[in-house]
Amino acid sequence: MRNNRKVIRTGDTVLHGPTGEKWLVAYAVDDRLAWCGWPEGEAKTSDCQIVDRGDDEDLHKLLQEMTQMRGSDARKRYAQQILKEERERSDKTLFDPPNTIG
């Protein structure tokens, strides 16, 4: 089944209209996205078009890689926060199973 997701997210590859460059997306928040690579920067999501949608595995792998970045970097902080929230959700489901008693 083809993924028709329109929202840009981590792991997608986009075409940035103004520069004609293809970028691997580090994160997309609201109307801004950050690309992987150097220099660190952001662009408007409205200037970008998805050319290849990453899957959940791509997203998770890239988040893990970004947590290993050196120095103060918004992409690293984003990845750390997303993975922390993911762990907290996972921990909650382990301790709060759904009520299955009928």
Image (cartoon, helix red, strand yellow):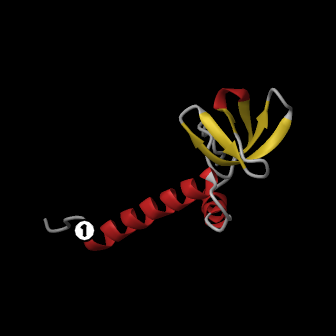
Taking the view exactly as shown, the residue that stands out farthest to the right is: 20
Taking the view exactly as shown, the residue that stands out farthest to the bottom is: 94
Q: Quadrant of residue 92?
A: bottom left
Residue 40 shown left or right of residue 7 in the figure = right
Disc tally is: 1
Q: In which quadrant of the rendered image does the C terminus lie?
A: bottom left
Identify the residue at image location x=73%, y=33%. 49
Q: Quadrant of residue 44?
A: top right
Relative to 102, residue 12 above or below? above
Q: Quadrant of residue 95?
A: bottom left
Relative to 98, residue 12 above or below? above
Identify the residue at image location x=49%, y=58%. 81
Of residues 15 and 56, the one drawn nearer to the viewer in this rendering: 15
Number of residues whose C-alpha sits closer than 10 Å to that of mark 1, classed few (under 14), some (14–19) or many (20 or more): few
Identify the residue at image location x=65%, y=65%. 61
Circle 1 SS class: loop
| Residue kind at label 1, given as amino acid type | Asp
Relative to 91, residue 36 above or below? above
Horizontal and vertical percent position of residue 38: 79, 51
Taking the view exactly as shown, the residue that stands out farthest to the left is: 102
Of residues 41 and 31, the one drawn nearer to the viewer in this rendering: 41
Relative to 48, residue 3 above or below? below
Horizontal and vertical percent position of residue 50: 72, 38
* Residue that label 1 marks: 96
Identify the residue at image location x=66%, y=45%. 2
Residue 62 shown left or right of residue 82 in the figure = right
Of residues 83 and 42, the one drawn nearer to the viewer in this rendering: 42
Horizontal and vertical percent position of residue 55: 64, 55
Horizontal and vertical percent position of residue 89: 37, 62
